[in-house]
Amino acid sequence: MNIAPDGLEFEKVHVWRGDRHVLQGVSEHVRPRELLHISGPNGTGKTTLLRVLSGLLRPEQGSVRWLGQSIMTFRTEYQASLAYASHEPALKSDLTALENLHFAVGLKRRIAAGELHAALDRTGVGACADLPARVLSAGQRRRVALARVLAMSATVWLLDEPYTNLDASGADLVSGLLQAHVQGGGLALVVAHHELLLPCSIRRLELHS
Amino acid sequence: MKVGAWQAFVLIVHRELCLSFRRPEQLFQPLVFFLIVTTLFPLGLSLQLSQLRDIAPGVLWVAALLSSLLSLDSLFKSDADDGTLEQLALSGQGLTLIVVAKTCAHWLLTGVALVVVSPIVATALGIPTAAFATMMLSLALGTLTLSWLGAIGAGLTIGLRRGNVLLSLIVLPLATPLLIFGAAATERAISGTSAVGALYFLAALCVFTCTLAPFAATAALRITLE
């Protein structure tokens, strides 16, 4: 039994959307060096859960604690240590890939252009750095979004279906990044529809309707 | 290393300016609207110069309000549509700072631009050059206030498909004091009497919205982000 509060803990989280009871008392405790694989059929509240855990959405009941403290009491500080990738890549189509990273990551931490280039190279879109996001393919946009997560060097990763639109090498890339992040002491919560086969500690949370 | 509030503010303003200059048509649309509306009045009414001067303040201010309203819709909506608003909200900088920076950038791109082109319009309406300074000052205060009022309305109407109409219905009633005092200041300046009283009222409205609207707009945005 671990006494010292660590990791991200959520307890009996309930969310209603109108009349629909989307999340019905979901609980889990994710510690550093752990990955939580969230799965379940469409419409069972996987994205809603990630939004609750990011602090964007306030649950009607239940609590979310980071390092033992409710995230709502220090939401801004908590969000500074968080990297969230929604199921859309969230890129400005008029800005280049590099500018997109610059304006998003620059709010989290001071970062040199070299580091942003390195992140784009790592996710395999280094050659697209100066192209507007509008001309990139769906897979390339996903890779730029992954580079953004990487460059934020956050402790908590919340990834909503990071494998969508990616080819086989892209899927390997996501797995490699997740593994490196978790083994480096971070924690990751990943929504994915297929099995995650990674040599690290994986907990599973399956949501039902 | 953590990013300070001022650096974050500069970064967001820079981002907004970059985005806006990539789409110049969005930048020029309200200005062209302002120019066209104000020049149509003298053509349509075929008035004497003295009569034109009588209606000039009202025409100028109504056109300024309506053209500012045109651009308000895009304040948060495009970011909300592509998901970047969520990223901004989760940047660890506090939503109020983001709202303040985005609204200031919006005013720089619309309000200041409107003030800059207003002498052209004023000339077309027969406003004497001596009144330009007061007119431009009143427009600067008025458009800044309107940007803040608009931030609240834009925050509330992000999620709606026909949000633009509702946005006008929310903002225009709140903007009527601006129209009254703004037009009064311009009118006084044209007739050569002191416009200080009306300008003070405009400044008071401006300070009032600058201090309180950021919190109201943040709360509105917080609700729509959920």
Image (tube, coloured by chain):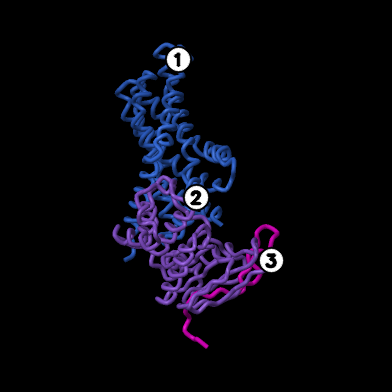
| In this picture, residue A172 sits left or right of residue B164 | left
Q: Which mark is residue B82?
A: 2
Tally of numbered tags: 3
Task: Label 1, secondary structure: give it.
Answer: helix
Query: Residue type at mark 3?
Result: Ser
Residue A18 covered by magenta stretch: yes
3D distance between C-alphas at marks 1 and 2: 43 Å
- Residue B100 at x, y = what percent? 41, 50
Q: Separation of disc 2 and disc 3 at Cα?
A: 28 Å
Dot in front, 1 or 2: 2
A131, above or below A105, in the image = above
Is residue A94 placed above or below A199 in the rendered structure? Answer: above
Q: Are marks 2 and 3 on the same chain?
A: no
Chain identity for the colour blue used in the image = B
Question: Magenta part mainly helix, strand or loop?
Answer: strand
**What is the secondary structure assignment of the residue under circle 2?**
helix
